[in-house]
Amino acid sequence: MKAKTPRATAASVYAVVGSDESTVKTTAKEMAAQLAPAGAGDFGVETIDGCADNAEQAASRIRSTIEALQTLPFFGGGKLVWLKNANFLGDNVIGRAASVQAALEELAAALQSDFGSDDVKFLLSAPELDKRRSFYKTLAKRAELQLFDKLDASRSGWEEAAADLVQSLGRARKLQFDPEALDLFVLLTGGDNRVIGNELEKIDLYLGNSERRVSLEHVRTLVPLSRGGVIFELGNALAARHLDRALALVRRLLDQGESAIGILLVAIIPTVRNLLLAKDLMQQHKLPRPSAPFSFISTLNRLPNDVTAHLPRKKDGSINGYALGIAATQAHRFETEQLVHGLEACLAANLQIVTSQLDHELILNQVVVKLLV
């Protein structure tokens, strides 16, 4: 995810940082090319390798940067000083060393000066930056700062943040996503800035100028289906009661080498369980059917803890609200008794897979048919 903080400065300071390392490197390289003095060649850019092996080396690289900032260009004109790929600005062993912190204080002081020349520019690129340190506060005040942080898919709420990012970047291209298309696009791209950008560009070129609405079929056609994407699609097909598509996706997962027990435990059972849980919550507490999964998350958060204690959780202990939100949008298609029988069919299928010689695809297909027909 990108955030940009422009600053008007007498001597130009620029920083490109964040956990999305690929985007940081690409953006910093492009910025270095833009900031380098025209016609100065190699003499116009002084690059300091910020990837240090230890604290002593890191402190040395920082002081080399300060020296470069305070040295006037050899042939007049301008100069760019680039501290590249600095690995000592995060909360790590090297970054916490007293010698490194002392050197960073010196660099912060230098950045608040005029470098001895208005023609000297400074560019910092780093994969990690501890925002609690005073050096970050100096950058935030002094630099044109660009942050590119990856979304952590293991943490609660990443899907909503990713959806906001996709919609924001899509609007810049005048693209509008249908709700189901947005859900699938978010899952397939996994919150990765680079992948999101590439896939949006692909969709943009495919649609051309005539149509700017992105449908579910557009996403299915253009965005590669990962293993996680096929599993997500199978769950969607089951919840939407699309029998033919669900059977086709079971076959696809088996062809990709997935085990029958894995498909049952990772895709089918969670879908049936979430549908049953969502339907029960909606009936017991008179919750309205949500128009989109994200709105159901807010509804869940307003319920008392004792009401939600049995709901499935993520690794961080938070409710897996997104999956339940998807189920809540589709739960009206099923009766509670159907879903209970569906879970019973899953249990029987589990036993058959591990104890019998029956064809595994046939077992899975029987579960799908019992649930949807």
Image (cartoon, grey):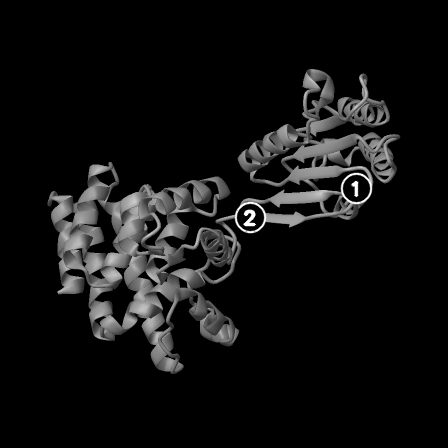
Q: Which of 103 and 17 is in front in this view?
A: 17
Within-10-Å neighbours for mark 1: few <14, some 14–19, many 20+:
some
Mark 2 or mark 1, which has the lower sequence index? Answer: 2
**Residue 236 image offset from top left, x and y in percent:** 28, 58
Secondary structure state at the residue bearing disc 1: helix
Q: Which residue is drawn at 83% across and 25% down?
A: 63
Residue to which mark 2 is pinned: 1
Image height check: is 60 above or below 220?
above
Q: What residue type is labelled 1?
A: Phe
Residue 11, placed above or below residue 287:
above
The front one of 293 and 235 is: 293
**Cα distance between the residues tagged 2 and 1:** 22 Å
Neighbour class for label 2 at 10 Å: few (<14), some, many (≥20)?
many
Q: Position of residue 91 (x, y in %)?
A: 70, 40
Q: What residue do we see at 40% from left, 54% from top?
A: 175
Q: Give the quarter of the image for residue 262.
A: top left
Mark number, residue 135: 1
Q: Where is residue 339 in the image (x, y as percent from the top left)?
A: 24, 68
Q: Position of residue 135 (x, y in %)?
A: 79, 41
State the SS at label 2: loop
Say which residue appears at 63% left-offset and 28% top-offset.
33
Amino acid type shown at disc 2 = Met
